[in-house]
Amino acid sequence: MTNNIDIIQQYKDKAFIYNILSIRTSTFYNRIKNIIQLPIILISSVMAILNSTFPPDHMQISNVVLNGCTAFLMNLAGTYQIAEKASRFKSVGQKWSQLLHLIEDK
């Protein structure tokens, strides 16, 4: 009987640790996602202001540079699937939490 209790305690401890790791990983990817999204928002805002202020002939080079930066950041986020990983780890963390509570209830 004590062997079964020890095994259940080990599963409970593992579920607790995996839950914490999943939550921390989700937080990490959310932070990276926000760090990438902020420059995209700023660059888009700057482009809108500059395009409405200056004539189109003067904005060709800056439009190319700013569009290139935006495309690079969006491609970076898409290639590494940062948003998907954040939501996936959040979901996994919730499942580990449910398992932990199920073990605690039993």
Image: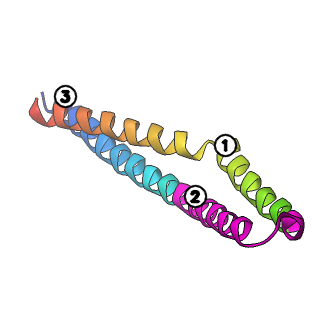
Closer to the eye: label 1 or 3 = 1
> As displayed, is residue 36 above or below residue 22?
below
> As displayed, is residue 100 above or below residue 37?
above
Tell me which numbered mark, 2 or 1, is placed earlier along the sequence: 2
Q: Main secondary structure of the magenta part?
A: helix
Residue 106 at what x, y percent from top left?
10, 29
Asked if marks 2 and 3 touch (Cβ < 8 Å), the reply is no
Q: What stretch is highlighted in magenta?
A: 32-61
Tell me which numbered mark, 1 or 3, is placed earlier along the sequence: 3
Image-based side of 10 in relation to 34, left or right? left
User: How far apart are the alpha carbons under marks 2 and 1?
Assistant: 12 Å
Q: Which of 92 and 32 is in front in this view?
A: 32
What residue appears at the point 53 percent right and 39 percent down from the top-left corner? 84
Mark 3 surroundings: few (<14), some (14-19) or many (≥20) residues within 10 A? few
Checking the image for residue 27, the label placed there is none
Q: Name the residue under label 2.
A: 37
Q: Nearer the viewer, residue 45 or 56?
A: 56
Mark 2 surroundings: few (<14), some (14-19) or many (≥20) residues within 10 A? some
Image-based side of 79 in relation to 83, left or right? right
Checking the image for residue 78, the label placed there is 1
- Callout 2: SS: helix
Q: Which amino acid type corresponds to the residue marked 3 in the rendered image?
A: Asn
Residue 105 at what x, y percent from top left?
10, 33
Q: Which amino acid type corresponds to the residue marked 2 in the rendered image?
A: Gln
Checking the image for residue 4, the label placed there is 3
What residue appears at the point 44 percent right and 49 percent down from the top-left corner? 26
Asked if marks 2 and 1 touch (Cβ < 8 Å), the reply is no
